[in-house]
Image: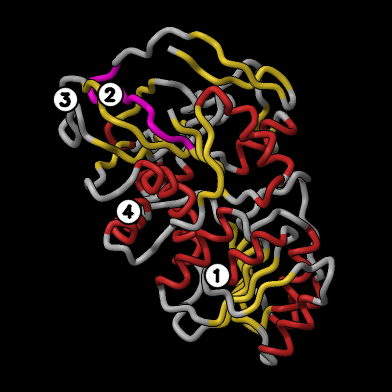
Amino acid sequence: MKAMVLTGIRKMEMQSRPMPALQGPRDVLIRMKTVGVCGSDVHYYNLGRIGSQVVRFPFAVGHEGAGEVVAVAAEVTRVKPGDRIAIEPAMPCWECDQCRASRPHTCRKLRFLGCPGQAEGCLTEYLVMPETSCFKIPEGMSFTEAAISEPLAIGLYAVNQSVPLRNASVGILGFGPIGMSVLLSAQAKGAERIYVTDLVEERLALARESGALWAGQPERVDAVGEIRNREPHLLDVVFECCGKQEAVNQAIALLKPGGKLMLIGIPSFDSWSFPVDALRHKEICIQNVRRQNHTLEETLDLLGNRSIDVGRMTTHRFPFERTPEAFEMVASYADGVMKAMIDF
């Protein structure tokens, strides 16, 4: 089969690899149909690492995927050949203290697609996953929607971990695919007053089209002042979705006393800095968000019943052979890209 692999910093190439085999009794062989390019993939493309997770080249990334079941091992019951599925990239052990505490996303032995030292990614023609990572999708759902369910589930998990959103005032700082996933999930939970910042004008236009009450470029306007004018009591919750120190500073300035800061973005540096005086006097709560936990099925339900429409999220499509162009586009924020999808 063919696999698209990282071979160095900002270098990718197509390689030939052996077909994966069913090894465990609950394994599923999948023919990949669509893969989304994620910001974390681009971290590996740009830097070769995220924190302590360092790529050893060559390495296949990619974890936002959907495909068709080709074959199943003897004990598989939840899917069968021919089923169309969304792929959950996390492969927990289901036995450690974290898994037993209903936290498989922080499993002590977690394997995650496209994560160095854990598992190669799904930018391959075929993939083997445990059946617990395979979620059948209805006929009316596209492979693109199924693949986008992965980042959307992160947005929904962040929203579920935040505050009651009906009648809440919400900030989203960074409107890439995760920021958009937060907005769509927050709307599904009843939020109406949502404020967005981003550096890319096309993304701001998309935020307005998607229902943001206000969207602005923080290097060109006083975003904190503009939002304060509209929300004099400040915001109930702010979702930091871009991994920038400036955004954290703005978030704390925007939060009302007792407000909650949700940290979702992946920074390129090792340590955040926080203004202690403002944190103490406002009694700000800080919540980190680690991928998603028990929200993929809810996400697929929301997509399936059309409570959430991700139709605007995909802005660019590339055939598998042109994957390097997709990564370069996303890495450069070129052409107003929001989500680039790879089609097999």
Q: Which mark is residue 209?
A: 1
First reached walking from the N terminus: tag 1 or tag 3: 3
Front of the two marks 1 and 2: 1
- Mark 1 secondary-structure assignment: helix
Query: In this view of the protein, which residue sits in the foreground, 85 or 258?
Result: 85
**How many residues crowd mark 2 within 10 Å: few (<14), some (14–19), many (20+)?**
many
In the rendered structure, which amino acid carries the disc numbered 1?
A: Glu
Q: Which residue is depicted at the point 59% across and 64% down? A: 206
Decide if residue 245 is on the left or right side of residue 265: right
Q: Can residue 180 be seen in this view?
A: yes
Image location (x, y in percent) of residue 22: 29, 16
Q: Work out which quarter of the rendered image holds the N terminus and state it.
A: top left
Image location (x, y in percent) of residue 100: 35, 46
In the rendered structure, which amino acid carries the disc numbered 3?
A: Glu
Decide if residue 228 is on the left or right side of residue 307: right
First reached walking from the N terminus: tag 1 or tag 2: 2
Q: Mark 4 points at which residue?
A: 300
Q: Mark 3 points at which residue?
A: 75
Image location (x, y in percent) of residue 68: 29, 30
**CB of mark 1 within 8 Å of CB of mark 2?**
no
Q: Mark 2 points at which residue?
A: 27
Chief secondary structure of the magenta portion = strand
- Mark 4 secondary-structure assignment: helix
**How many residues crowd mark 3 within 10 Å: few (<14), some (14–19), many (20+)?**
few
First reached walking from the N terminus: tag 3 or tag 4: 3
Q: Which residue is depicted at the point 42% across and 52% down? A: 293
- Location of residue 40 (image quadrant): top right
First reached walking from the N terminus: tag 2 or tag 4: 2
- Mark 2 secondary-structure assignment: strand
